Amino acid sequence: MEKQQYTVTNNEKEQRFEILEAGHLGYLEYRFYKNNIAMMHTFVPDALEGKGVASALAHHALEWAREHHKPVIVYCPFVAAYLKRHPEYNELLA
């Protein structure tokens, strides 16, 4: 099965990465703490569940952290599970 490509936007005002798909909004909330970025909570509406939205959000957020040299603190259970499946991001953890 081919992976769905999503456009992820960084809504800096709301402090979350977002995917708008078919009128539904999924997001990953973050907060800044000192020099770190804390991944707080991932939300995916029922209409988008099982379509890779949460994984796309986690991937984008971790790539953003890498690009901006921000150590990552994880509070979100989904991001924690994503990191178990993608240990290549463990170097980003604060």
Image (cartoon, helix red, strand yellow):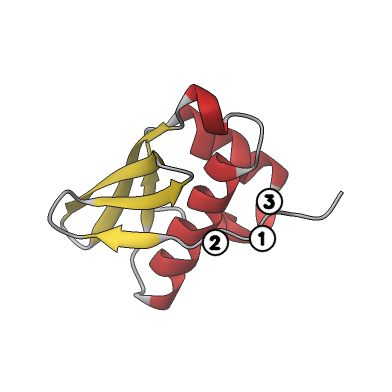
Tell me: residue 52, above or below residue 87. Answer: above
SS at mark 1?
A: helix
Residue at left offset 19%, top offset 53%: 32
Residue 58 picture location, percent across and down: 51, 49
Please rate how many residues cluster around mark 3, counting C-alpha atoms within 10 Å: few if below 14, some from 14 to 19, many from 20. Answer: few
Identify residue type, mark 3.
His
What residue did someone put label 3 on? 86
Q: Residues within 10 Å of mark 1 (few under 14, many from 20)?
A: few
Comparing labels 1 and 2, the label whose residue is closer to the camera: 1
Give whichever of 92, 60 is nearer the camera: 60
Q: Earlier in the sequence, mark 3 or mark 2?
A: 3
Residue 53 vs residue 59, the one in the foreground: 53
Give me the C-alpha separation between circle 3 and circle 2: 11 Å
Q: Residue 66, percent across and down? A: 45, 70
Q: Which residue is mark 1?
A: 88
Residue displayed at 30% across by 61% down: 10
**Could you tell me which secondary element the residue under label 2 belongs to?**
helix
Kindly report the distance in space between the C-alpha atoms of the residues bearing marks 1 and 3.
Answer: 5 Å
Label 1–label 2 contact, CB within 8 A: yes
Farthest left residue in view: 13
**At 61% from the left edge and 41% from the top edge, which residue is drawn?**
82
